[in-house]
């Protein structure tokens, strides 16, 4: 029975040079939510009879996102590589708005926090749509999965 989902996800911690408690919490929540509910169907392996679930290893190498897709036993099925040039601006904007959001939670009014959070969600949603577009023809996924994957892509870009 096909089960096109991610059952395990791992980030290349060697590319993450620094992260604070807020970012670590975002990472934990994104991974937990992703594992709990996702749609991830790599088209080539699926067509070759590997119908999921999948293990996913994310890393950034030479300015490209590497998505190593494996089966449940960890046997690599394929590596997808996406150029990240089109994600640079959304990642930069997302970091900036997140920093404002984390500061606001500590001292702003509820209305100010809500305004910043709406902007943060907007950037996140746009980036998720871009990720779905970039994965087209390679991986079938849904919007919530793309949002969580974008969060993890951002974590891989933290430089301190």
Image (spheres, rainbow, N blue to C red):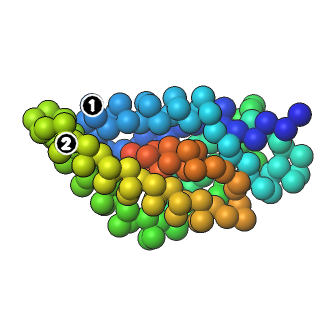
Q: Secondary structure at mark 2?
A: helix
| Residue 129 seen in the figure | yes
> Residue drawn 24% across and 55% down?
96
Q: Point out the frontmost of discs 2 and 1.
A: 2
Q: Residues within 10 Å of mark 2 (few under 14, many from 20)?
A: few
Q: In the image, is residue 63 above or below residue 76?
A: below
- With 61 as the anchor, is 119 left or right in this view? left
Residue 62 x, y percent position in the rendering: 46, 64
Q: Residue furthest front?
A: 111
Residue 79 x, y percent position in the rendering: 67, 55
Q: Quadrant of residue 66?
A: bottom right
Q: Quadrant of residue 112?
A: top left
Q: Secondary structure at mark 1?
A: helix
The answer to whether marks 2 and 1 mark residues whose Cβ atoms lie closer than 8 Å is no
Quadrant (top left/top right/bottom left/bottom right) for the N terminus: top right
Q: Which residue is mark 1?
A: 21
Q: In the image, is residue 9 above or below residue 121?
A: above
Residue 37 x, y percent position in the rendering: 62, 33
Q: In the image, is residue 21 above or below residue 69?
A: above
Q: Residues within 10 Å of mark 1 (few under 14, many from 20)?
A: few
Q: Earlier in the sequence, mark 2 or mark 1?
A: 1
Is residue 113 or residue 54 the one in the foreground?
A: 113
> Residue drawn 67% across and 64% down?
136
> Residue drawn 30% across and 60% down?
93
User: Which label belongs to residue 109?
Assistant: none
| Residue 15 seen in the figure | no
Q: Which residue is mark 2?
A: 111
The span from disc 2 to disc 1 (Cα, nearest Å) is 24 Å
Residue 57 x, y percent position in the rendering: 58, 43
| Count of labels in the image | 2
């Amino acid at each position: 029975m096909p089960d096109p989902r991610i059952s395990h996800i791992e980030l290349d911690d060697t590319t993450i040079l620094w992260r604070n408690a807020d970012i670590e919490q975002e990472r934990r929540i994104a991974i937990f939510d992703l594992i709990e509910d996702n749609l991830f169907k790599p088209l080539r392996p699926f067509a070759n009879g590997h119908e999921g679930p999948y293990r996913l290893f994310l890393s950034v190498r030479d300015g490209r996102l590497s998505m190593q897709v494996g089966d449940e036993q960890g046997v690599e099925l394929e590596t997808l590589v996406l150029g990240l040039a089109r994600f640079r601006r959304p990642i930069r904007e997302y970091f900036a708005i997140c920093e404002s959001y984390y500061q606001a939670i500590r001292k702003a009014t509820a209305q100010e926090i809500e305004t910043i959070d709406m902007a943060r969600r907007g950037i996140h949603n746009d980036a998720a749509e871009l990720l779905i577009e970039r994965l087209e023809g390679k991986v079938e996924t849904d919007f919530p999965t793309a949002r969580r994957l974008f969060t993890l892509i951002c974590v891989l870009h933290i430089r301190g």
